[in-house]
Structure formats: structure tokens, C-alpha cells
Image (tube, helix red, strand yellow):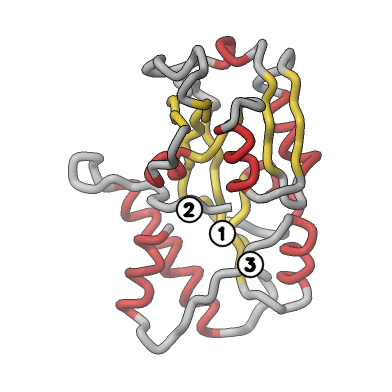
Amino acid sequence: MTKLILEWRAAHPGVCVTPYESGDRSLHAALTDCQIDAALVPDFLLHNYGTGSLVYSEPLMAVVPTSHRLASQRDLRWRHLQTEILLLWAAGKGEACREFFAARLPCTSLRVFEADSLTVLAFVRIGYCITISAGAYSTLNLYGLVFVPIVEENAHVDVSLTWRPESEDPVMGKFVAFIRDRTELYRRTPPSSVAFGNPDPSP
């Protein structure tokens, strides 16, 4: 998404994009009340919104402390995590988050923290549990943590752009069209030419 925002800024230098981060309830309220113009939401929350357009698919990775038995693995499957305590950060989307992972790890003990990602990662680092994060977090090189890819067909989260369809703001219309067009262009471009994905950890 960062790449798309930078391209938008280059094409429209006079239009400022200001980020806003919150839980799903307050995010939905902010969009409905016109406090924000658009939002990025994961697929398991998209049903709460009137419209959406897929922007990118974020791979999921298991995050374990360096001393953990799985830290030396090149990749993992869901079955390797069934006996673990899985700590998730929710930040306002706890039940939906729990359902998403319960469908993939039905026998795993799931614990949801209404906390941000760094708080949960700190608990993982001291050996309290493990977690699952967006693959983009692995680029941060966080001390004491190992990020291991999960090689399953459903080990990803689709992220969509959503907005108010009744909005008559011409700038917003241009922004949505721009993101849609660039996303479609990247999808049609061979992987050897461009790596399409999300280069930064988004909520």
C-alpha cells in the first residue's frame, strides 16, 4: 500500500493523505460520520462495510521467540501450531479476529489482547506465547523474535479499500479510481517485473 500512496502523492502532490488507525468499531463510525474518507479493512471485517475493492493480500507468518522449538523451521503448516498458546492483538476487532484464526486452528488455545502489535510482540519475545502477524512485520528485524512463513493456501489476509459510496467528493472519487487502476495494473504485471504486495505493516 505504501507504494500506491507514494504514486498517488507524485500524481497529486497537492492532496494530503493522512493515516488514521483504530479498532473496527471506531473505524466504521469514523467512516460513517465522515471523519475519514476511506479505510483499509481485512476481508473478515469487510461485511461491515457497504463497498470494497481488493488492494493486496498479506501473507501470514508465525512469530516465536528465538529459543522456541519452531524457531529453526524454514516454514510451518497450521498443524505445527495446534498445541501452542496463540496470542492475538485485536484493537477493537477481537471476536472477528478470534473467528478468523479459530477456523484455521480449531484446537489451539487462542487468547486475544485488546492491545497494539508491539505489546503482543513483547509478550512473545519473553516466551509467554507465540503469535501470528502480517508478513510485513518481518522486515522490522525485531530483536529476540523469529518470523516463520506459514505455507498454507489460506495463510493470508486479503485487504480491501472501502469508502462511502454516496460520497460526492471528486477528490475521493479520483483516489478510489487511482487505487483500483494501479492495483489492477500490478496484478497484470508479471512477478519478475514488479513485486506487488504490502511493503509495510498495516492494521
Q: Is residue 76 left or right of residue 95?
A: left
Badge 3 or badge 2: first in the primary sequence: 2
Spatial distance from mark 2 to mark 1, Cα to Cα? Answer: 6 Å
Picture disc at residue 138 = none
Picture disc at residue 161 = 1
Q: Secondary structure at mark 1?
A: strand
On screen, 4 above or below 80? below
Q: Which residue is mark 3?
A: 163
Q: Position of residue 115 (x, y in %)?
A: 71, 48
Q: Is residue 77 left or right of residue 114?
A: left
Looking at this view, name the residue that lies furthest to the bottom.
14
Tag 2 and tag 1, C-beta contact below 8 Å = yes
- Residue type at mark 2: give it: Val
Q: Which residue is mark 2?
A: 55
Spatial distance from mark 3 to mark 2, Cα to Cα? Answer: 13 Å
Looking at this view, name the residue that lies furthest to the front.
126
Badge 2 local density, few (<14 within 10 Å), some, or many (20+)? many
Q: Position of residue 153 (x, y in %)?
A: 49, 23
Residue 163 falls in image quadrant: bottom right
Front in this rendered view, residue 167 or 200: 200
Q: Secondary structure at mark 2?
A: strand
Tag 3 and tag 2, C-beta contact below 8 Å = no
Q: Is residue 178 left or right of residue 203?
A: left
Front in this rendered view, residue 170 or 147: 147
Q: Position of residue 110 (x, y in %)?
A: 74, 26
Q: Quadrant of the N terminus?
A: bottom left
Tag 3 and tag 1, C-beta contact below 8 Å = yes
